[in-house]
Amino acid sequence: MTSAETYQNRIELLQGTLDMIVLQTLQWGPMHGYGIAQSIRLKSSEVLQVETGSLYPALHRLERKRWVKSEWKLTESRQRAKFYQITRAGKQQLAADHERWQSMVHAIAAVMGPTTEPLKEQS
């Protein structure tokens, strides 16, 4: 696959969706930024690839809202990294976001699904 094809096949996330995906990823336990990006990439079968230019601003925004907290720790390779963890408020936000996401998915599916009768042109 060429880089142009890869770019065309990328799925742009709806506004607010990245926050929800990051919060969901942190449900599995505390992670550093690179781990979060890798988890999203692997869990989505490499369809979603979160760039650092999007991920770190999202993490900082989530931290300001107190939906995640962070602390500096050593990684398995003994490097210092900031690990993020979802908070109780973050879990509540994730539940609300997930509910809205499900409504959106159902609405889009209804619009994109087959129609029972052809649309009539209005005169």
Image (spheres, rainbow, N blue to C red):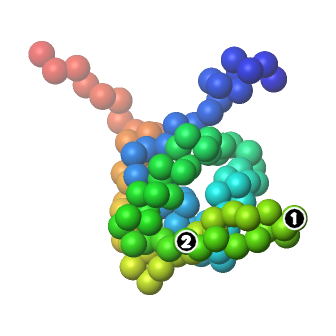
Q: Which residue is mark 2?
A: 70
Q: Residue at x 55, y 40 (%)?
A: 53
Q: Position of residue 23 (x, y in %)?
A: 52, 67
Q: Residues within 10 Å of mark 1 (few under 14, many from 20)?
A: few
In terms of image quadrants, where is residue 120? top left
Q: Residue at x 69, y 63 (%)?
A: 81
Q: Point out the residue furthest to the bottom here.
A: 88
Q: Residue at x 39, y 72 (%)?
A: 66
In terms of image quadrants, where is residue 43? bottom right
Q: Position of residue 94 (x, y in %)?
A: 44, 71
Can you tell which mark lies on residue 47? none
Q: Could you say which is closer to the camera, residue 18 or residue 101?
A: 18
Q: Position of residue 6 (x, y in %)?
A: 71, 26
Q: Could you say which is closer to the camera, residue 60 or residue 54?
A: 60
Q: CA distance from mark 2 to mark 1?
A: 19 Å
In terms of image quadrants, where is residue 97? bottom left
Q: Residue at x 74, y 45 (%)?
A: 46
* Amino acid on which the number 1 mark rests in the picture: Ser
- Say if residue 113 shows up in the picture: no
Q: Which residue is mark 1?
A: 77
